[in-house]
Image (cartoon, rainbow, N blue to C red):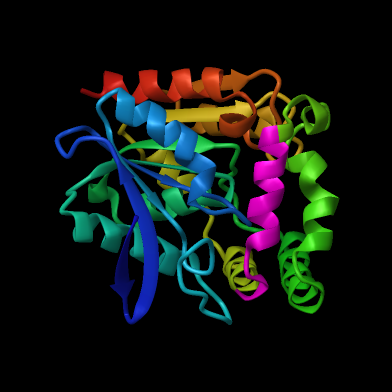
Amino acid sequence: MGTYEVDGVKLAYEVWGPEGGVPVVLVHGHPFDRSLWREQGRRLAEAGCRVVLPDLRGYGESQVVPGVTPFPVFAGDVVALLDHLGIADAVVGGVSMGGQIAMEIRRLHPERVRALVLADTSYPAETEEGRAGRLALAERLLAEGMDGYADEVIGRMVAPYNLVAKPDATAHVLRMMRSTDPEGAAAALRGRAEREDYEATLAAVTVPVLIVVGADDSFTTVADAEVIRRLVPHATLTVIDGAGHLPHLEQPEEAGRALVEFVTRLG
Protein backbone atom coordinates (compact mmCIF):
# COMPACT_ATOMS: atom_id res chain seq x y z
CA MET A 1 0.00 0.00 0.00
CA GLY A 2 1.08 3.57 -0.67
CA THR A 3 -0.32 7.07 -0.36
CA TYR A 4 -0.03 10.27 -2.36
CA GLU A 5 -1.63 13.72 -2.20
CA VAL A 6 -3.65 15.78 -4.64
CA ASP A 7 -4.26 19.37 -3.51
CA GLY A 8 -3.80 18.34 0.11
CA VAL A 9 -6.11 15.31 -0.11
CA LYS A 10 -4.41 12.06 0.95
CA LEU A 11 -5.25 9.12 -1.30
CA ALA A 12 -4.41 5.42 -0.95
CA TYR A 13 -3.45 2.80 -3.49
CA GLU A 14 -1.65 -0.50 -3.91
CA VAL A 15 0.57 -1.85 -6.69
CA TRP A 16 0.99 -5.45 -7.84
CA GLY A 17 3.48 -6.99 -10.27
CA PRO A 18 6.79 -6.04 -11.88
CA GLU A 19 7.69 -2.48 -12.79
CA GLY A 20 8.38 -3.42 -16.39
CA GLY A 21 4.99 -5.03 -16.96
CA VAL A 22 2.08 -3.59 -18.91
CA PRO A 23 0.57 -1.00 -16.54
CA VAL A 24 -3.08 -1.56 -15.66
CA VAL A 25 -5.18 0.76 -13.48
CA LEU A 26 -8.46 -0.70 -12.21
CA VAL A 27 -11.01 1.68 -10.68
CA HIS A 28 -13.65 0.44 -8.26
CA GLY A 29 -17.29 1.48 -8.33
CA HIS A 30 -19.72 2.83 -5.73
CA PRO A 31 -19.81 2.19 -2.82
CA PHE A 32 -16.73 -0.02 -2.82
CA ASP A 33 -12.96 0.19 -2.45
CA ARG A 34 -9.85 -1.09 -4.16
CA SER A 35 -10.21 -4.58 -2.67
CA LEU A 36 -12.97 -5.11 -5.26
CA TRP A 37 -10.22 -5.64 -7.85
CA ARG A 38 -7.63 -7.38 -5.67
CA GLU A 39 -8.21 -10.90 -7.00
CA GLN A 40 -7.95 -9.64 -10.57
CA GLY A 41 -4.88 -7.62 -9.62
CA ARG A 42 -3.24 -10.83 -8.44
CA ARG A 43 -4.12 -12.61 -11.69
CA LEU A 44 -2.75 -9.80 -13.83
CA ALA A 45 0.42 -9.54 -11.74
CA GLU A 46 1.02 -13.26 -12.15
CA ALA A 47 0.75 -12.68 -15.90
CA GLY A 48 3.53 -10.07 -15.67
CA CYS A 49 1.46 -6.88 -15.54
CA ARG A 50 2.01 -3.94 -13.23
CA VAL A 51 -1.38 -3.38 -11.60
CA VAL A 52 -2.43 -0.20 -9.79
CA LEU A 53 -5.50 -0.29 -7.55
CA PRO A 54 -6.55 3.12 -6.22
CA ASP A 55 -9.03 3.94 -3.50
CA LEU A 56 -11.08 6.82 -4.91
CA ARG A 57 -11.31 9.86 -2.67
CA GLY A 58 -14.07 9.29 -0.14
CA TYR A 59 -13.70 5.50 -0.30
CA GLY A 60 -11.56 2.85 1.36
CA GLU A 61 -8.47 4.28 2.99
CA SER A 62 -8.50 7.53 1.01
CA GLN A 63 -9.47 10.80 2.63
CA VAL A 64 -13.12 11.73 2.73
CA VAL A 65 -13.97 15.10 1.18
CA PRO A 66 -17.59 16.11 1.91
CA GLY A 67 -19.74 18.01 -0.56
CA VAL A 68 -19.46 17.14 -4.24
CA THR A 69 -16.75 15.16 -6.01
CA PRO A 70 -17.11 15.83 -9.76
CA PHE A 71 -15.91 13.16 -12.15
CA PRO A 72 -13.08 15.37 -13.49
CA VAL A 73 -11.69 15.37 -9.93
CA PHE A 74 -11.79 11.57 -9.74
CA ALA A 75 -10.12 11.39 -13.16
CA GLY A 76 -7.48 13.89 -12.11
CA ASP A 77 -6.72 11.86 -9.00
CA VAL A 78 -6.06 8.74 -11.08
CA VAL A 79 -3.85 10.64 -13.52
CA ALA A 80 -1.95 12.13 -10.58
CA LEU A 81 -1.38 8.58 -9.33
CA LEU A 82 0.07 7.61 -12.70
CA ASP A 83 2.38 10.63 -12.44
CA HIS A 84 3.32 9.65 -8.89
CA LEU A 85 4.31 6.17 -10.11
CA GLY A 86 6.06 7.39 -13.26
CA ILE A 87 3.58 5.71 -15.62
CA ALA A 88 3.12 7.51 -18.94
CA ASP A 89 0.05 5.58 -20.07
CA ALA A 90 -1.89 2.53 -18.93
CA VAL A 91 -4.73 0.19 -19.58
CA VAL A 92 -7.49 1.97 -17.67
CA GLY A 93 -10.46 -0.04 -16.49
CA GLY A 94 -13.34 0.26 -14.12
CA VAL A 95 -16.60 -1.29 -13.05
CA SER A 96 -19.91 0.59 -12.91
CA MET A 97 -19.08 4.13 -11.68
CA GLY A 98 -15.43 3.17 -12.08
CA GLY A 99 -16.09 2.48 -15.75
CA GLN A 100 -17.58 5.93 -16.11
CA ILE A 101 -14.51 7.41 -14.45
CA ALA A 102 -12.37 5.45 -16.92
CA MET A 103 -14.35 7.09 -19.72
CA GLU A 104 -13.81 10.47 -18.07
CA ILE A 105 -10.07 9.83 -18.02
CA ARG A 106 -10.21 8.99 -21.71
CA ARG A 107 -12.22 12.18 -22.37
CA LEU A 108 -9.87 14.50 -20.49
CA HIS A 109 -6.53 12.70 -20.77
CA PRO A 110 -6.65 10.49 -23.88
CA GLU A 111 -2.87 10.30 -24.10
CA ARG A 112 -2.76 8.45 -20.77
CA VAL A 113 -5.04 5.60 -21.93
CA ARG A 114 -3.51 2.82 -24.02
CA ALA A 115 -6.61 0.62 -23.74
CA LEU A 116 -9.99 0.63 -21.94
CA VAL A 117 -11.77 -1.99 -19.85
CA LEU A 118 -15.43 -1.14 -19.28
CA ALA A 119 -17.16 -3.51 -16.89
CA ASP A 120 -20.90 -3.36 -16.14
CA THR A 121 -21.17 0.32 -16.93
CA SER A 122 -23.00 2.77 -19.19
CA TYR A 123 -22.06 5.93 -21.04
CA PRO A 124 -25.11 8.29 -21.20
CA ALA A 125 -25.37 11.35 -18.99
CA GLU A 126 -27.85 11.09 -16.14
CA THR A 127 -31.52 11.64 -16.94
CA GLU A 128 -33.45 14.17 -14.89
CA GLU A 129 -35.11 11.31 -13.04
CA GLY A 130 -31.79 9.60 -12.47
CA ARG A 131 -30.18 12.83 -11.31
CA ALA A 132 -32.94 13.37 -8.76
CA GLY A 133 -32.52 9.78 -7.59
CA ARG A 134 -28.76 10.18 -7.09
CA LEU A 135 -29.24 13.36 -5.10
CA ALA A 136 -31.97 11.84 -2.96
CA LEU A 137 -29.83 8.80 -2.25
CA ALA A 138 -26.96 11.05 -1.17
CA GLU A 139 -29.21 12.67 1.41
CA ARG A 140 -30.54 9.31 2.53
CA LEU A 141 -27.06 7.90 3.12
CA LEU A 142 -26.09 10.94 5.16
CA ALA A 143 -29.22 10.60 7.27
CA GLU A 144 -29.34 6.82 7.67
CA GLY A 145 -25.83 5.50 7.05
CA MET A 146 -24.87 2.68 4.72
CA ASP A 147 -26.31 -0.45 6.32
CA GLY A 148 -29.90 -0.21 5.11
CA TYR A 149 -28.83 0.69 1.60
CA ALA A 150 -26.37 -2.22 1.53
CA ASP A 151 -29.04 -4.70 2.59
CA GLU A 152 -31.44 -3.27 0.03
CA VAL A 153 -29.18 -3.54 -3.03
CA ILE A 154 -27.00 -6.57 -2.29
CA GLY A 155 -29.32 -8.78 -4.38
CA ARG A 156 -28.60 -6.57 -7.39
CA MET A 157 -24.91 -5.99 -6.76
CA VAL A 158 -24.48 -9.76 -6.99
CA ALA A 159 -26.98 -11.95 -8.81
CA PRO A 160 -29.73 -13.14 -6.42
CA TYR A 161 -28.74 -16.79 -6.81
CA ASN A 162 -25.16 -15.90 -5.78
CA LEU A 163 -26.24 -14.60 -2.39
CA VAL A 164 -26.09 -18.21 -1.21
CA ALA A 165 -23.98 -19.81 -3.94
CA LYS A 166 -21.13 -17.29 -3.50
CA PRO A 167 -21.12 -16.48 0.24
CA ASP A 168 -17.55 -15.13 0.27
CA ALA A 169 -18.25 -12.73 -2.60
CA THR A 170 -21.50 -11.63 -0.98
CA ALA A 171 -19.77 -11.00 2.36
CA HIS A 172 -17.02 -9.04 0.61
CA VAL A 173 -19.49 -6.79 -1.17
CA LEU A 174 -21.50 -6.17 2.01
CA ARG A 175 -18.32 -5.39 3.93
CA MET A 176 -17.22 -2.81 1.37
CA MET A 177 -20.63 -1.13 1.24
CA ARG A 178 -21.14 -1.02 5.00
CA SER A 179 -17.67 0.35 5.69
CA THR A 180 -17.91 3.20 3.18
CA ASP A 181 -18.14 6.65 4.75
CA PRO A 182 -21.56 8.17 3.92
CA GLU A 183 -19.95 11.58 3.33
CA GLY A 184 -17.68 10.17 0.66
CA ALA A 185 -20.47 8.18 -0.95
CA ALA A 186 -22.77 11.20 -0.99
CA ALA A 187 -20.10 13.41 -2.56
CA ALA A 188 -19.57 10.86 -5.33
CA LEU A 189 -23.31 10.47 -5.94
CA ARG A 190 -23.65 14.23 -6.36
CA GLY A 191 -20.77 14.25 -8.81
CA ARG A 192 -22.16 11.28 -10.68
CA ALA A 193 -25.49 13.05 -11.07
CA GLU A 194 -23.72 15.74 -13.12
CA ARG A 195 -21.46 13.48 -15.23
CA GLU A 196 -20.83 13.99 -18.92
CA ASP A 197 -22.33 11.98 -21.74
CA TYR A 198 -19.51 9.80 -23.11
CA GLU A 199 -21.01 8.88 -26.48
CA ALA A 200 -18.65 11.12 -28.45
CA THR A 201 -15.69 10.00 -26.37
CA LEU A 202 -16.36 6.33 -27.03
CA ALA A 203 -17.20 6.83 -30.70
CA ALA A 204 -13.76 8.42 -31.18
CA VAL A 205 -11.82 5.70 -29.34
CA THR A 206 -9.20 3.95 -31.48
CA VAL A 207 -7.36 2.08 -28.70
CA PRO A 208 -8.36 -1.50 -27.80
CA VAL A 209 -11.50 -1.80 -25.68
CA LEU A 210 -12.80 -4.72 -23.62
CA ILE A 211 -16.45 -4.63 -22.53
CA VAL A 212 -17.43 -7.04 -19.75
CA VAL A 213 -20.92 -7.58 -18.34
CA GLY A 214 -22.58 -10.09 -16.07
CA ALA A 215 -25.29 -12.02 -17.89
CA ASP A 216 -27.79 -11.21 -15.12
CA ASP A 217 -26.74 -7.63 -14.33
CA SER A 218 -29.93 -5.65 -13.67
CA PHE A 219 -28.20 -2.28 -13.19
CA THR A 220 -26.30 -2.19 -16.49
CA THR A 221 -27.66 -4.97 -18.64
CA VAL A 222 -26.26 -7.02 -21.49
CA ALA A 223 -28.31 -4.78 -23.77
CA ASP A 224 -26.48 -1.75 -22.38
CA ALA A 225 -23.15 -3.45 -23.08
CA GLU A 226 -24.25 -4.24 -26.61
CA VAL A 227 -25.02 -0.56 -27.17
CA ILE A 228 -21.43 0.27 -26.23
CA ARG A 229 -20.23 -2.50 -28.54
CA ARG A 230 -22.14 -0.98 -31.46
CA LEU A 231 -20.70 2.43 -30.63
CA VAL A 232 -17.16 1.02 -30.52
CA PRO A 233 -17.15 -1.57 -33.33
CA HIS A 234 -13.61 -2.79 -32.70
CA ALA A 235 -14.33 -3.54 -29.02
CA THR A 236 -14.44 -7.04 -27.60
CA LEU A 237 -17.61 -7.88 -25.66
CA THR A 238 -17.51 -10.65 -23.06
CA VAL A 239 -20.69 -11.74 -21.27
CA ILE A 240 -20.03 -13.60 -18.01
CA ASP A 241 -22.62 -16.25 -17.18
CA GLY A 242 -23.59 -16.78 -13.57
CA ALA A 243 -22.96 -13.18 -12.56
CA GLY A 244 -24.77 -9.95 -11.86
CA HIS A 245 -23.22 -6.49 -11.52
CA LEU A 246 -19.82 -7.64 -10.24
CA PRO A 247 -18.64 -10.54 -12.43
CA HIS A 248 -14.98 -10.14 -11.42
CA LEU A 249 -16.03 -11.14 -7.90
CA GLU A 250 -18.88 -13.50 -8.72
CA GLN A 251 -17.08 -15.46 -11.45
CA PRO A 252 -13.41 -14.58 -10.93
CA GLU A 253 -12.05 -17.40 -13.10
CA GLU A 254 -14.00 -16.60 -16.26
CA ALA A 255 -13.88 -12.83 -15.83
CA GLY A 256 -10.20 -12.98 -14.93
CA ARG A 257 -9.39 -15.07 -17.97
CA ALA A 258 -11.01 -12.49 -20.27
CA LEU A 259 -9.16 -9.64 -18.56
CA VAL A 260 -5.76 -11.32 -18.60
CA GLU A 261 -6.12 -12.40 -22.24
CA PHE A 262 -7.09 -8.89 -23.29
CA VAL A 263 -4.24 -7.15 -21.47
CA THR A 264 -1.51 -9.63 -22.36
CA ARG A 265 -2.41 -9.42 -26.05
CA LEU A 266 -1.47 -5.73 -25.93
CA GLY A 267 2.20 -6.66 -25.53
Q: Which image quadrant for residue 222?
A: top right
Above or below for 146 versus 96? below
**Quadrant of the image occupied by residue 193:** bottom right
**Residue 61 vertical position relative to residue 166 in the rendered view, above or below:** below
> Can residue 129 be seen by looking at this rendering?
yes
Which stretch is magenta?
168-183
Residue at position x 48%, y 24% in the image: 256
Residue 17, percent from left and from top: 26, 35
Does 115 sit above or below residue 58?
above
Residue at 63% across, 71% down: 190
Total numbered badges shown on the rendered structure = 0
Look at the image and tell me in which quarter the C terminus lies: top left
Can I make out residue 208 in this image?
no
- In the rendered view, does 159 fall on the left or right side of 184? right
The image shows residue 244 at horizontal and vertical percentages of 71, 32
Q: In this view, does 222 lie to the left or right of 72?
A: right
Q: Where is residue 260 in the image (x, y as percent from the top left)?
A: 38, 22
Residue 130 relative to residue 186: left or right: right
The residue lying at 68 percent from left, 39 percent from top is 220
Left or right of 14 on screen, residue 164:
right
Decide which of 25, 63 is in the foreground and name it.
Answer: 63
Q: Magenta segment: does it hold 177?
A: yes
Between residue 37 and residue 164, name the one nearer to us.
164
State the quadrant of the N terminus.
bottom left
Instruction: Tell me the residue at 27%/42% (across/down).
Output: 90
Looking at the magenta stretch, what is its main secondary structure?
helix
User: Nearest the camera: 93 or 232?
Assistant: 93
